[in-house]
Image: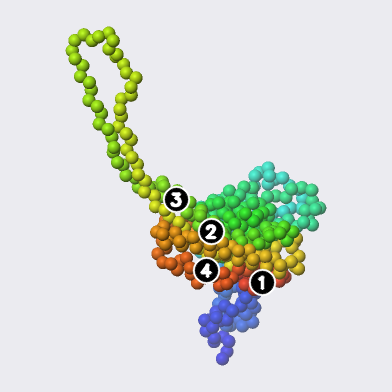
Amino acid sequence: MQLDRLPVELYTAIVSHLPADSLQQDVLALTRAIPRSPVPIYHLFEHIRLKHARQIIQLYRRLRNAIDERNWVKDFGVVTWTVDADVLVNLLGILPRISSLLLFVGPNFAPEHLEEIFHKPRQDLRLLSLRFRPYVNRATYYQFLKGAYFDTTLTALSRWPPYELPALSIVQDPLDPAIATTQNFAQPLVFFRLDPISVLLCSAYIKSLKHLRLRIPSRQVCRFISSIPFSVPALRLLDLSTCNVLVSDVEAILTRFHGLQHLILDGCGIARDQSQAGEWINIGRICAHATVKRAKAREKELKTWLERNAATISTPAGIPEPAARHIRPGRRGLATATISFREAPTASEPEIIQFIPKVRVVPSLPTLLSLSTSSSFIPDVQHQSIREDFEKGWNEGLAQLAAVKSRLYQSWRNGVKMMRITADAGGVGYDGLEAIEVENAFHSERDASASLAPAILCLAGPGTSGKHMEGCNHNIAWNVWNDTI
């Protein structure tokens, strides 16, 4: 059979097996090799990666008057740090159906450019990745004097309607230490204030977010994430690499997010080495025991709500006022007092009886499946001993969790109402809580320490060069973000 007689569907099936990075070049070569064959040309525009500044101008000229080709662009990325930002803004303005957007934001970008790009919501967007590298070779104070920071980008995204966005990546590349030692001036900042992070995570647009990568080197971003109720309830993977993260922040994160399964903290230095005895044991204990603190916090919120909305019954127990004394007519004696220091009897206040039910919240099993962290202070020879300490702490945390559930089980048998957390919600009554009616909620098959394996601890760091643990969250993150940084 001749190639030009093959059906279009067959070529589409063949193209679907090509790697995305080389899809455009492969389809272009295929159309030139067999020009008479019905190779669908829309595959040329499905996956676009622009690696040079001139390519942006060429593509804009090609699509400016091509209405059909504009809708073919689904996966769009600019992977060069030097571009004409104005032309890029115009190009993105004519591409309405983008589902995956990757932008390298270099020193040529101004905050106004990103504001204009994200001014109009994109309903089809499923992956948004912004990578910042604003560093310059010569000192410039234009950004500081103007106050040109990218805080407004986060604010612009927070105004979008509640579309579905499963993955969001905001990364600031760390400054190369070799360059930093040779320069004696301050580099431009990407974000001046971190409050817009809270605004974005509380917005309706981020409600369906499952994968979040937020890297701002040496900045304390945890309190802008973990201290916000109702934010990103569907979060399953969180990457805070290069940020300033402490062990207490890890506990706050695991306490806050009910369904978090993968936590990546490369370059954060939560535990530098084994110089402090029990450090990794404590981290393992926190990872397994965080659900207890989450249950106590939720129980406190519920108690406050019940006290505020408690039913009240007023029982009037007033004393009838005494009748006024009859004064006889005629002249009164001089010794008769006209005033009295005795207080008149008053009706007693109505008795208020509050009915506040006692409700306890049973902690759930830990949901964390993998934890990744790395530091230049941890040599490879210590990895095995660190994992052993982490596993020891994990088992201690499970033992404490089992003891708490055993005490609550006895209270449940004595008639105390028990609830368990079913969703990442809190602070509003019984929202996200479910009543426990059966005994299995306290003693399930997974409660045994032997059946609940510790979370995978990977110390290989970012990139593919290290010795990664099988099933670690790095592999999951690479598939989500389509990169290996």
Determine which of the numbered discs, if any, sits on residue 303 in the image: 3
Above or below for 115 versus 259: above
x 62%, y 72%: residue: 471
Query: Which mark sits nearer the N-terminus, 2 or 3?
Result: 2
| Residue underneath mark 4 | 447
Instruction: State the separation of the CA atoms marked 2 and 3.
Output: 16 Å
Determine which of the numbered discs, if any, sits on residue 292 in the image: 2
x 67%, y 65%: residue: 389
Q: Is residue 210 visible?
A: no
Using residue 353 as the reference point, say whether residue 16 is left or right of it: right
Q: Nearer the viewer, mark 4 or mark 3?
A: 4
Kindly check if marks 4 and 3 are in contact, taking CB atoms under 8 A apart as contact. no
Kindly check if marks 4 and 2 are in contact, taking CB atoms under 8 A apart as contact. no
Nearest the eye: 32 or 183: 183
| Residue underneath mark 1 | 469
Q: Nearer the viewer, mark 1 or mark 4?
A: 4
Q: Nearer the viewer, mark 1 or mark 3?
A: 3
Amino acid tagged 1: Met
x 72%, y 70%: residue: 465
Q: Is residue 4 visible?
A: yes
The N terminus sits in image quarter:
bottom right
Query: Which mark sits nearer the N-terminus, 1 or 2?
Result: 2
Dot 2 surroundings within 10 Å: few (below 14), some, or many (20 or more)? many
Instruction: State the separation of the CA atoms marked 1 and 4.
Output: 25 Å
Dot 1 surroundings within 10 Å: few (below 14), some, or many (20 or more)? some
Using residue 189 as the reference point, say whether residue 166 is left or right of it: left
Nearest the eye: 78 or 402: 402
Query: Which mark sits nearer the N-terminus, 4 or 3?
Result: 3
Counting from the top left corner in percent of width and height, residue 428 is at 44, 52
